Amino acid sequence: MRAIALLSGGLDSTLAAKVVMEQGIELEALNFMTLFCTCTSRGATCLASQKAVETLDIPLRIFNVSEEYLGVVKDPKHGYGRNMNPCIDCRIFMLKKAKAYMQDSGAAFIVTGEVLGQRPMSQRKEAMRLIEKEAELEGLILRPLSANVLPMTVPEKQGWVDREKLLKFQGRSRKPQIQLAEHYGIHDYPCPAGGCLLTDPGFAKRMKDLMLHEPAFSMNDVHLLKIGRHFRLSDGVKLVVGRNEEENRKIETFAQEQDLLFKLSGFPGPLSLLRGKADGRDIEKAAAITAHYSKAKDLGNTEVIYKIVNEDRYRSLSISPIPRGEIERLMINE
């Protein structure tokens, strides 16, 4: 019997796969990656799930669904969690993808690492029922870690798996999982629960600001949210200021044709990106903020140069670094 395991690479999904494999089920792991995942490499690979399948010795398919997933984040039917995490809609989206792959591959059911009561939004009984119904997978999602405190599934009713050998974990304590990991000799699980940027309060503030002022945002806009200091200068204008050389390079990489790039003339400092229909006041603010974060911030007037990305010619401004109080007013978050 074959099944599909949704594998984040975290401890729960790894243990769930192991429990089912012990009953002779042939597993293939799926990982749906988005630009909000925190466990990815520069090569756009989920490092945590790769590590997990090496431990489990099962095949893995990774699907990058970032572009499509933006629609879920922009308008989740079931709303957001504490921050900008659309957990219920996210789960439905991923399970629909998994169902399509399950049917194409000839697998019989889906295995997840969900634990009843562990996550307040998506791992309640009512939420689990709702998710199964909307994903059109009622009875076909086996949650081995909590199976004995949940209704019987098709795999259990059909005798494909033995319910008596499944577990009854529930609640937010991690002790049962850690003990089970010790039993299996699993010691390296690099992606803990919460490996999603949308659950991070600081990132969520930036995301809310982006959705409010630029509702037609792109993946490029989201990538920029991950780096630098962010400032809202006016309704359609935002500044991103690099915090180190690596972020300066990333800002240059993500800069688009009509963006403005700012830097100090003759002093070490950040590279800043101004995006939107900026007027003269926005440009002056951007230059003053850039100067504030440079080595010249205590020298009074300093020269800041800037240019449109797709042009070679720099323009120059002599400007005083912006006062700290104004910085705090304009900053989206620290």
Image (spheres, helix red, strand yellow):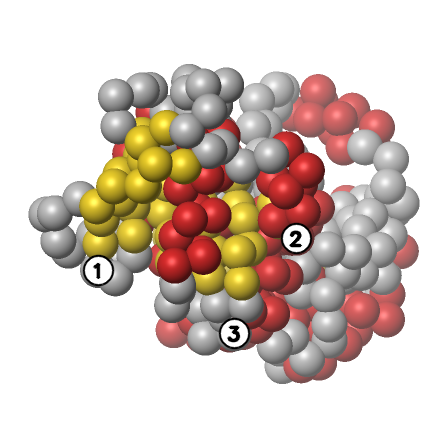
Residues marked 3 and 1 touching at CB (< 8 Å)? no
Of badges 3 and 1, the one in the foreground is: 1
Left or right, 194 with reference to 218? right
Disc 1 marks which residue? 257
Q: Earlier in the sequence, mark 1 or mark 2?
A: 2
The C terminus: image quadrant: top right
Q: Earlier in the sequence, mark 3 or mark 2?
A: 2
Residue type at the position of mark 1: Glu
User: On the image, which quarter does residue 47 sit in?
Assistant: top left
In this view, the residue in front, 278 or 133, is 278
- Decide if residue 192 is in sight here: yes
Left or right, 125 with reference to 56? right
Q: At x 57% / y 22%, what residue is drawn? A: 188
Residue 41 spot, x, y in % from top left: 38, 36
Residue 226 spot, x, y in % from top left: 48, 44
Distance in Å between CA atoms under marks 3 and 2: 15 Å
Residue 237 spot, x, y in % from top left: 46, 62
Crowding near pointer 3: few (<14 within 10 Å), some, many (20+)?
few
Residues marked 3 and 2 touching at CB (< 8 Å)? no
Q: At x 73% / y 55%, what residue is drawn? A: 83
Distance in Å between CA atoms under marks 3 and 1: 20 Å
Left or right, 162 with reference to 101? right
In the rendered view, tell whether residue 230 sits above or below residue 247: below
Left or right, 117 with reference to 206? right
Mark 1 residue element:
loop
Distance in Å between CA atoms under marks 1 and 2: 26 Å
Residues marked 1 and 2 touching at CB (< 8 Å)? no
Disc 2 marks which residue? 205
Of badges 1 and 2, the one in the foreground is: 1
